[in-house]
Image (cartoon, helix red, strand yellow):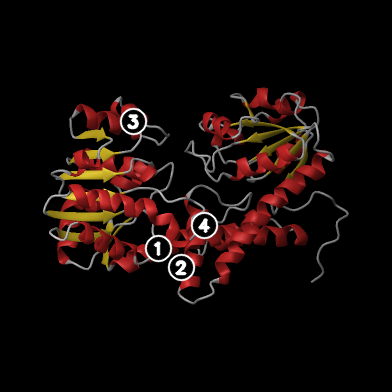
Amino acid sequence: MRIAIIGTGHVGLITAVGLASVGNDVVGMDLSPETVATLGRGQAPFHEPDLDRLLRDGLQARRLRFTTSVADAVTGARVVFICVGRPPEGNGDKSLSAVEEAARAVARAAGPEVVLVVKSTVPPGTTGRIGKVVLLERPDLDLVAVSNPEFLREGHAVEDTLRPDRLVVGSDDPRGFEVLRDLYAPVLAHSRLIETDPRTAELAKLASNAFLATKISFANALARVCELADADVGGVTEIMGADPRIGASFLGAGLGFGGYCLPKDIVTLERVADRLGYDFGLLREASSVNDASLIAVFRKIEEAVWNLEGKIVTLLGLAFKPGTDDVRGAPAMALAELLHKEGAHVRGVDPMAGHAASALAPWLEVIEDSYDAALGAHCLVSCTEWPQFRDLDLVRIHSLMAEPSIVDGRNVLDPGEAQAAGFQYAAVGRPTQNPDLARVPI
């Protein structure tokens, strides 16, 4: 099937290489000539496991190419995906201008019959509006507008594309279902196909991310209670997660959620509800708890080093999650900014995200080796759950630091090992090591 992909960011590029890998002819379109040239050389502009391999395979098989022209991409395409991004700080529908602009450009170049698939995360009702915009531009088109939200996890996005846990298709026209069933036939054996109306599909994407964000915030609020009660949040959430109605995922206490999607989508859903006349205060509180979680870790660093000005603070991890080089909305980067403003010299180490972090914060000293990054530091802070940080030689780290202090912002280190190595150790929601602390009375 001939497919056009408008926008080659995280969602668009992975959709393009995934559809090409199962036998479709795919043209990806991006406005940036530099991006198109880089992709044409078989190099992805961001890290995802297996992405570079699938990109090169698609190019070599001539099932995948890239262009800066919407007309070039869309001409002859049976299905056109809109995968353009939305600003993380969008205010209502104003952030949808890129989606609308892409739809108008597609309308001008589309053939007489086209299935237009909105894969960008959008408020409910957007797909219907996009269909109307296209038909105003081209009343002659036999158009079907379909919502097909993505549920990709960064660091697992290729796997999620080829073996999705669910595929959601929202259409008001049977042809939309038929065409996407045909398109996704090679991966349906690994997935549950859910067919619904576009508004439900659009809202389900926002609701999924908002719920995950709220679940993280619950764990972080619980961590504050555990600290006051001298309990261990890890033990509490392990017991909670053993209940299949709750599940263990997204219950890790720490710096809070970040990235591009969760912060944006929880705000979008709250604003959608507000415009519809419902006060979804739970979502505002989840965002507030998330902000407070970052500040709580910052305060632990302040307490550990006393005076931040002139002190060296080393952050273990800069990406918003392991498995990616994405620093957009990363809690580590927000923490680095707070420390920098207070006069600290901030170092960072990350196996993937160092270059992106340097581009975002030129004042940040990025060091490749964890032990080099610890040399002369006054505080070590875990910010991303990369597995290699769990295996650090803490005795060696202790010998390198100016002051032996660890703030475990992701609870990735063993408290006993840290203390045995001679560290002053503070974590999130873990019991204090002060034996004189009075427990909360029952």
Residue farthest to the right?
A: 436
Query: For the C terminus, which image quadrant?
Result: bottom right
Element under disc 3: helix
Residue at coordinates 81% horizontally, 65% vertically from top-left?
A: 440
Q: Is residue 215 left or right of residue 109?
A: right
Element under disc 1: loop
* Mark sitting on residue 33: 3
Amino acid on which disc 3 is placed: Pro
Q: Give the label, 3 or 2, closer to the camera.
A: 3
* Mark sitting on residue 274: none
Amino acid on which disc 2 is placed: Val
Label 3, label 4: how many angstroms apart (C-alpha)?
A: 43 Å
Q: Give the mark, 3 or 2, whose residue is nearer the N terminus.
A: 3
Q: Give the mark, 3 or 4, whose residue is nearer the N terminus.
A: 3
Amino acid on which disc 1 is placed: Pro
Q: Position of residue 230 (x, y in %)?
A: 76, 58
Residue farthest to the front?
A: 137
